[in-house]
Image (spheres, rainbow, N blue to C red):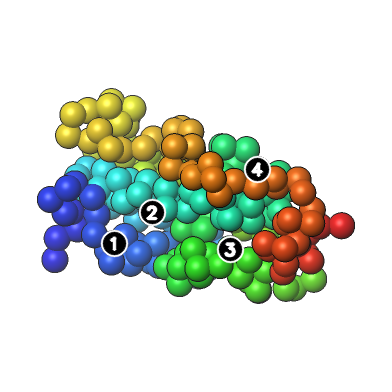
Amino acid sequence: MTTVEASGAMPLHCFWQLIDAARAGSASSERPFADVLSDLLAARSRREIVAYERTFGQVRSTLYRWDVWAAAYVIGGGCSDDAFMDFGAGVIALGRTGYDEVLASPDSLAQHPVARDGDPGRLEDLLFDEEANYAAARAFPRATGDGAWEEVAGADDTDAVDDGDTDVDHEGLDPAEAFDFDDTQEMRRRLPALAALFLP
C-alpha cells in the first residue's frame, strides 16, 4: 500500500489512519496529540512526511468557510487568521468523524463531550491546537538528520508544502457568504447551540 500519491500527497485513508493513531497514542499516554503525531511522522520517510503535510494543508483548507470560522469565533471569543489555522488543526485532531461532523454542521461542536461537561471553555483549549500545525516540521529533521524543513517548503518537488506559517486563503472564502461575527442575533440564528454555550 503506497502512502504517497502521484500528486505527492498522502492518500486520505492513510492520512486519517495516522491521525487516528496519534489520537489513540495521545489518549493512552496522556501526551499532547501534536507530540505523538510528530513521533509517528519522524518514523516515516522524508517523502511520506512531505506527503502528509500536503494532505494536511488540503484537509485544513477545506474548513475555510465562513460558518466554520464563525464557530471558531464564538468558541474562542474572537478568531484571527492565525487562530483559525490553529482551530483547523484542532478540528483535524478530532479525527475523520469529528472533522466530517464539523463540515456538515459547525454548530455540532456544542455536542462535544468536552463542551457538555459543565465547562465549555475547555472546548477552546481542545480545538485551538497550534502545535498540531507544526508536527511535520518538527518530525522532518528527526527523520532526515537535518533541519532543512524551510528549504523543503520552497523546493520544486514540494512546492505545495505548508510550513504552518501561511495565512488563511481569503480567496477561498466567498465574500457573498460573509456575515458579521459580532452580530449576536445573527450568530444565535446560525449557531444556536454554540451561541447558547458561549454568548451572553
Mark 1 or mark 2, earlier in chain = 1
Q: Separation of disc 3 and disc 4 at Cα?
A: 15 Å
Classify 137 as above or below 17: above
Mark 2 or mark 3, earlier in chain = 2
Q: Separation of disc 2 and disc 4 at Cα?
A: 19 Å
| Residue to which mark 2 is pinned | 59
**Hey, what amino acid is under mark 1?**
Leu
**Hey, what amino acid is under mark 4?**
Cys
Q: Separation of disc 1 and disc 2 at Cα?
A: 9 Å
* Residues marked 2 and 3 touching at CB (< 8 Å): no
Mark 2 or mark 4, earlier in chain = 2
* Residues marked 1 and 2 touching at CB (< 8 Å): yes
Q: Separation of disc 2 and disc 3 at Cα?
A: 16 Å
**Hey, what amino acid is under mark 2?**
Val
Mark 3 or mark 4, earlier in chain = 4
- Residue 128 shows in this picture: no
**Hey, what amino acid is under mark 3?**
Pro
Q: Residues within 10 Å of mark 3 (few under 14, many from 20)?
A: many
Which residue is painted at 72% across and 63% down in the image?
A: 189
Mark 1 or mark 4, earlier in chain = 1
| Residue to which mark 1 is pinned | 12
In screen coordinates, is 136 left or right of 25? left
| Residue to which mark 3 is pinned | 106
Q: Which residue extends farthest front?
A: 176
- Residue 178 shows in this picture: yes
Labels in figure, total: 4
Q: Nearer the viewer, mark 2 or mark 3?
A: 3
> The N terminus appears in which quarter of the rendering?
bottom left
Q: Which mark is residue 79?
A: 4
Label 1 SS: helix
Label 4 SS: loop
Which residue is painted at 29% across and 62% down in the image?
A: 12
